[in-house]
């Protein structure tokens, strides 16, 4: 018998019939916990049962405990984590190691981190090194990934629902995610580390929205949110009408009831990567943490920006914006923002500008549109930030380098599409988006060098990136 099979017999049969302490059947019903943490109910002396089995001999006294003789074995009822393991073992026997190397259980099991519960374990002496020898070890179950996503699906006193895509669907999702997590030298100089993290994040993101704590989802017929849901980012990880025809729990192939919840088996994922982790990135113009300092950026002038609060304007994101203006009337101005947490995917980029009226309250003031240019600076494969723009955007409307806004309204100016060569998820560094006011002396009567920047918005492009010309595609270097 293989070691894994032996342990399965111990956990699912032997420990499924033994309690830690001697328990007698009496005149009152009671629940008892077995060695594998499963809970079964005991009947009474007038109707003696253990779980679904009848007791044929009651309270048989032994030297080291009490035995209840049953007419049948107690069925093992797996929790969700155990059921994932059981399904994996079945497929592994059918398909082999190579076919199952990428699978949900293969990923999760790498991060098992069980701990010894010394208070409940029985010690007997020490070995030659002075270490305590335990004759009865009680382990506290823990898995680092499941703990990180707050899905303790191995705990018996929990209540979860789980979306279980097929192994083929899981593998396809991982393959879909892998290209979005290409880290470069700036992340780590060791290529094996970068590859390892790419593989980790691909599997991690494929796992995140599979589990739902039903103690937090009392209104699940209206909406249901996964264990990674956060109120601070409420647009994601929440799914409406899950039981409806197009809901995430409507297209299941079968269900399996577990000891701590329900598993919904599906042939494919019921949600896309754009609903879970490939998210819109929004950089608030007034956030100084995203503004690069002048010494870190060639020809960058950030000394002339200031923050103006406008809480009365509901359309202003976060109730504030950056007022960007040149320090002298004869020069244009530049400001560079770090784009945080970008993936190595394709985004549509927008610059959201406010009308000058948020600053100039005088109704007689001359209102002109801003005119500016936009460039991307992305670290090369060596991790070094270039001194020349990686991509200089051209206005899709006329092919020029210049962009203008409508000064009479809040205007999201479309800059263009960009494919990032590298991912900076989980890092403090990233790429830079530089905005440069660009008004010539002959254009002063038509445009202003001032910008009232509300935010920079990057929206993931669904599907493959559109082929762009050499100046706007990050996958084609222009150094």
Image (cartoon, rainbow, N blue to C red):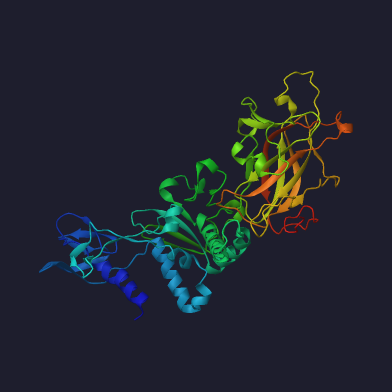
Say which residue appears at 53% left-offset and 51% top-offset.
242
Question: Can you give x and y, in whole percent of width and height, for residue 84 in the image?
Answer: 43, 65
Say which residue appears at 55% left-offset and 66% top-offset.
192
**Does residue 315 appear anywhere in the picture?**
no
Residue nearest the observer in this picture, 253 or 285? 285
User: Please, which residue is most extreme toward the front here?
Assistant: 295
**Taking 278 as reference, is 464 left or right?**
right
Q: Is residue 315 above or below residue 472?
A: above
Q: Quadrant of the N terminus?
A: bottom left
Q: How many marks overall?
A: 0
Q: For residue 381, what is the image quadrant?
A: bottom right
**Taking 397 as reference, is 337 left or right?**
left
**Taking 128 as reference, is 465 left or right?**
right
Say which residue appears at 43% left-offset and 46% top-offset.
216
**Does residue 139 appear anywhere in the picture?**
yes
Question: Can you give x and y, in whole percent of width and height, for residue 245 in the image?
Answer: 58, 54
Residue nearest the observer in this picture, 6 or 295? 295
Question: Can you give x and y, in whole percent of width and height, for residue 471 in the image?
Answer: 79, 53
User: Please, which residue is most extreme toward the right here?
Assistant: 442
User: Please, which residue is most extreme toward the bottom here?
Assistant: 1
Q: Quadrant of the C terminus?
A: bottom right
Question: Can you give x and y, in whole percent of width and height, for residue 338 in the image?
Answer: 64, 45
Residue nearest the observer in this picture, 375 or 459? 375
Residue nearest the observer in this picture, 386 or 144? 386
Q: Is residue 272 above or below residue 459?
A: below
């Amino acid at each position: 018998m293989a070691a894994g099979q032996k342990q399965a017999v111990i956990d699912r049969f032997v420990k499924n019939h033994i309690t830690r302490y001697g328990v007698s059947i009496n005149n009152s019903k009671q629940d008892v916990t077995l060695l594998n943490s499963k809970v079964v109910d005991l009947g009474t002396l007038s109707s003696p049962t253990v779980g679904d089995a009848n007791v044929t001999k009651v309270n048989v006294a032994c030297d080291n405990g009490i035995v209840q003789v049953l007419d049948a074995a107690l069925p093992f009822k797996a929790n969700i984590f155990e059921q994932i393991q059981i399904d994996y073992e079945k497929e592994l026997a059918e398909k082999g190691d190579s076919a199952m190397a990428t699978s949900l259980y293969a990923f999760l099991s790498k991060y098992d981190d069980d701990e010894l519960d010394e208070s409940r374990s029985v010690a007997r002496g020490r070995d030659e090194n002075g270490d305590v020898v335990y004759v009865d070890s009680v382990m506290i179950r823990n898995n680092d990934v499941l703990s990180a996503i707050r899905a303790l699906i191995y705990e018996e006193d929990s209540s979860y629902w789980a979306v279980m895509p097929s192994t083929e669907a899981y593998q396809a999702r991982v393959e879909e995610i892998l290209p979005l997590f290409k880290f470069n030298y700036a992340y780590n100089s060791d290529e094996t580390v970068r590859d390892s993290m790419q593989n980790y994040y691909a599997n991690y993101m494929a796992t995140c929205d599979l589990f739902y704590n039903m103690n937090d989802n009392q209104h699940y017929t209206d909406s249901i949110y996964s264990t990674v849901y956060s109120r601070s980012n409420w647009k994601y990880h929440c799914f409406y009408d899950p039981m409806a025809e197009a809901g995430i729990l409507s297209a299941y192939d079968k269900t399996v009831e577990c000891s701590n919840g329900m598993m919904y088996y599906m042939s494919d994922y019921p949600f896309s990567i754009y609903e879970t982790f490939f998210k819109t990135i929004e950089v608030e113009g007034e956030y100084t943490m995203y503004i690069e300092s002048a010494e870190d950026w060639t020809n960058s002038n950030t000394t002339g920006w200031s923050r103006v609060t406008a809480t009365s304007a509901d359309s202003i994101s976060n109730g504030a914006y950056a007022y960007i203006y040149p320090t002298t009337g004869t020069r244009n101005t530049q400001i560079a923002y770090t784009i945080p947490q970008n993936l190595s995917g394709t985004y549509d980029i927008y610059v959201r500008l406010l009308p000058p009226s948020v600053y100039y309250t005088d109704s007689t003031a001359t209102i002109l549109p801003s005119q500016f240019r936009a460039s991307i600076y992305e670290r090369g494969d060596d991790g070094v930030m270039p001194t020349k723009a990686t991509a200089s955007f051209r206005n899709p409307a006329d092919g020029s380098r210049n962009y203008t806004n409508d000064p009479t309204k809040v205007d999201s100016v479309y800059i263009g599409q960009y494919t990032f060569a590298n991912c900076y998820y989980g890092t403090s560094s990233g790429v830079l988006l530089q905005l440069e006011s660009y008004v010539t002396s002959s254009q002063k009567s038509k445009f202003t060098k001032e910008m009232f920047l509300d935010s920079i918005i990057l929206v993931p492009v669904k599907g493959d990136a559109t082929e762009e010309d050499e100046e706007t595609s990050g996958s084609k270097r222009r150094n």
